[in-house]
Image (cartoon, rainbow, N blue to C red):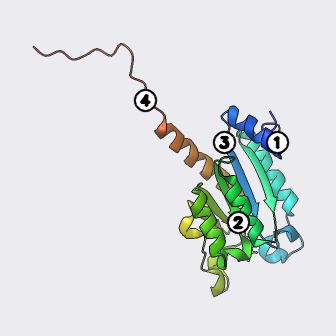
Amino acid sequence: NAAAAGIPIHCSLLLTEARDRHMLRLLVLHGPNLNLLGTREPSVYGQASLPDIDKSIVRRAGERGIAVQTKQTNVEGELVTWIQNARGHFDGIIINPAAYTHTSIAIRDAIAAVALPTVEVHLSNIHQREEFRHHSFIAGVALGQLSGFGPTGYLLALHALAAHLEAVSKASRPRTAPKNKPTASRR
Ligand code: DQA
């Protein structure tokens, strides 16, 4: 069991296996400049590198029996394509769109189009920072937003998204009629 062993899910074969095992499959996307974490403005973004963060996400997912794939790009269109391609392969998305949060209608539209529950994560508290970071084009189509908790935000997002998906799948399961329930009889 690759995910339980804490191994990231790399290919569609493993995703198919995860689906067949009824594991939740989550896609974690990191936007521009997040590849520089660790050296990039550490007073704002902390000391952890992106591989450190990804490792902790994969480890936590493995503990919960969730399959995760993590990806980073500096290219807006690549994020759009990955979101589009997530349909049918993933149950939900965790995304830190980085600076595209504040500019990208294309990423917002892709999330709305695939209609996969999506959690928006920011390492820093965007509402405490410059005015131009206060607005998120993503928030309106996201299940929720976690901002200001550093790398822990990704783990909180994982728990929140898994709890949401589990609640949705429980609610949609057909209810089985209780056995041997005495029927009330009226005279
Ligand atoms: C960020 C916040 C954005 O405003 C910024 O452009 C980033 C990172 C964060 O994780 O705090 O690149 O998304």
Question: If you read the primary sequence from the N terminus, does the residue marked by circle 1 or circle 4 appear first?
Answer: 1
> Would you say the residues marked 3 and 4 are in contact, meaning their CB atoms lie under 8 Å apart?
no
The quarter of the rendered structure image containing the C terminus is top left
**Residue shown at 63%/86% (left/top)?**
131
Judging depth in this view, the residue of 75 and 43 nearest the camera is 75
Disc assigned to residue 167:
none
- Residue 40, given in percent of the width and then of the height, sits at 86, 75
- Residue 65, given in percent of the width and then of the height, sits at 71, 38
Q: Which of label 3 and label 2 is nearer to you?
A: 2
Question: If you read the primary sequence from the N terminus, does the residue marked by circle 3 or circle 4 appear first?
Answer: 3
Q: CA distance from mark 3 to mark 4?
A: 21 Å
Circle 1 is placed at which residue position?
6
Name the amino acid, label 1: Gly
Q: CA distance from mark 2 to mark 4?
A: 38 Å
Q: Secondary structure at mark 2?
A: helix
Name the amino acid, label 2: Val
Q: Secondary structure at mark 3?
A: loop
Judging depth in this view, the residue of 126 and 91 nearest the camera is 91
Question: If you read the primary sequence from the N terminus, does the residue marked by circle 1 or circle 2 appear first?
Answer: 1
Query: How many other residues sit within 10 Å of disc 3, few (<14), some (14-19) or many (≥20)?
Result: many
Disc assigned to residue 80:
2
Disc assigned to residue 24:
3
**Is residue 123 placed above or below 117 in the rendered structure?**
below
Name the amino acid, label 4: Arg
> Would you say the residues marked 2 and 4 are in contact, meaning their CB atoms lie under 8 Å apart?
no
Circle 4 is placed at which residue position?
175
**Is residue 10 placed above or below 98 in the rendered structure?**
above
Q: Which of label 1 and label 3 is nearer to you?
A: 3
